[in-house]
Image (cartoon, rainbow, N blue to C red):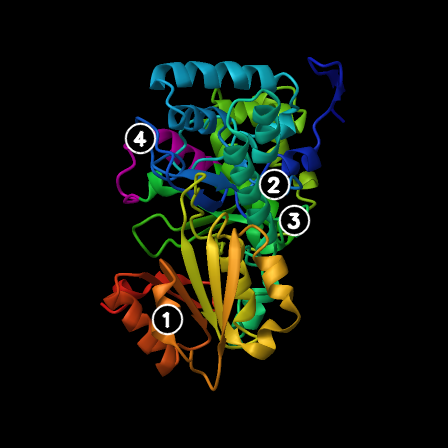
Amino acid sequence: MAASRLSPRGENLRFDINSLMRALPVWGLDPLILTQIPGFPRPTITREMYVGEDIKFLEPPAGRNEPYVDPVDFMRRIFIYQGINADKALKLAEEQYNMLRRSLSIFERAVFHDSYFEPLPEHISIVTLLKHMRENKLAPDHLIGFFEKASEVTRSIPMFEGEERRKLNEKGSNFWYCHKLTDLPDFPFPRAMIEFIPAPWRVSRYNRDDDPIFWAWRKAMKPITASLEKELGESVYYSDEQIDEISDYVHRFLILHLWCSYKPDSSYVRYLVEASGAADVDELKAALIDPANYVHPFKMNEFFCSVMRCKSMTYLPPGKRKTVGVVFASENARPVAEAILLQQIGADVVIAAPEELLKGDTLCRQATRFCRHSGSFFIKDGVIPEPVTFLAQIDELYVVADVVQEDFEGLLWKAVDLKIQAYICHDTGIISEYEQSLF
């Protein structure tokens, strides 16, 4: 057993596989993008997946249950939005994060895995960051309030695919058997413990010189993974040797082991070492291939987790108005409509649905609680009685249906003719722009 040590804060340290697992996202090592918020561009754009024109809320480490953001990038954008010079905005954002960082534990300032093995900055809870910004008056209350609501919406909408959905989908069932961020399990389900070997090595097996560290690691792992499989009774490394392109699926611990071999001095590996309580990289590497640490159930598979992310939520500053129409006609479509309504922060909404689905006003009270104002039209016999009047009130249209009925098809066409942005929202959770879906 490894001897315990003291952390810089005086805490007892010893390698703990559960602590390591709590430092990682549940649904894969790469955090899923939960939602994105346009309108706050940064002056320079780096890799589009995590940093670009939109602010992105990311999946948190296990058990945190709140969206995570890059605090420096987030504050810099907010400061620029308020008219501060880009260089001064960056300096101020860095100063503010350094001030906040002193109070955060390692589990509150995550460094996430990146499939391209490039360093990513620390990410923290948007809730924690907004609290700091509000206390230090770093942005107007209305703007901070918008992001607080956006965070709550992101936490409230079912979006993570679970085993229940996979089983139900085989029977043609809908997607509302997803997990919310607030009720994610503490640890991954067995299929989510498996990762695909990332993009840098999807190259010909016959070209071994382009990344010698990877090829040497892969070769060295063969006897180790064979021994693990024999002891654990389950494969930890699957490779299809019949094709020329890399097609490897591996246990997440082996991806972490590869990081330790490939970039041992990276911020990500330092984060893993600190979070796990390991003495150094060598102790962490040894622990990642120790069968005694494979205590969490796993199942080899070609698993790709999808997330039914929120559609972009748009900030409406004081004085700016937008009206959104949401149409649905069945109980099965109702949860999708509720999710769309929740995302209309600060907007006016008009709901068109059969009267029986709007009785009691529960939908209006809950799903429209962040909207400025809500109204309704009753659908009778599958038809909106005054479609032109309905469309004349709105700037954006969402039609939710199990199958787009002929009456709704006509409504969508009218919306396109009137230059209204129109979307089809299926009970599978997919939202697509109607005009583009025709081609």
Check disc 2: other Cα within 10 Å, few if <14, some if 14-19, many if 20+: many
Give the residue pinned by disc 1: 389
Q: Which residue in the protein does label 4 denote?
A: 45
Nearest the eye: 398 or 393: 393
Q: Earlier in the sequence, mark 1 or mark 3?
A: 3
Mark closer to the chain start, 2 or 1: 2
The label nearer to you, 1 versus 3, is 1
* Image coordinates for residue 404, horizontal then vertical, percent: 39, 77
Task: Report, in whole angstroms, how far the alpha carbon at label 2 lies from the one at label 3.
Answer: 7 Å
Give the Cα separation between the discs numbered 1 and 3.
Answer: 39 Å
Mark 3 and mark 4: span between their CA atoms? 31 Å
Residue 216 drawn in magenta: yes
Q: CA distance from mark 4 to mark 1?
A: 43 Å
The answer to the question of whether label 2 and label 1 lie on touching residues, with beta carbons closer than 8 A, is no
Which numbered circle lies on residue 182? 3
Residue type highlighted by circle 3 = Thr
Of the numbered discs in the image, which one, if any, rests on residue 424?
none
Taking depth in this image into account, of 216 and 410 the one nearest to the observer is 410
Question: Residue 195 at x, y = what percent?
Answer: 49, 47
Q: Nearer the viewer, mark 2 or mark 1?
A: 1
The local crowd at label 3, few if under 14, some if 14 to 19, many if 20 or more residues have their Cα within 10 Å, is some
The residue under the point 37% across, 53% down is 241
Query: For residue 66, which numbered disc appears in the image?
Result: 2
Q: Amino acid at mark 1?
A: Thr
Magenta stretch bounds: 203-220
- Type of amino acid under label 2: Glu
Secondary structure state at the residue bearing disc 4:
loop
| Kind of element beneath mark 3 | helix
Quarter of the C terminus within the rendering: bottom left
* Of pointers 3 and 4, the one earlier in the residue sequence: 4
**Which residue is rendered at x = 57% and y = 75% of the image?**
331
Left or right, residue 291 beside residue 380:
right
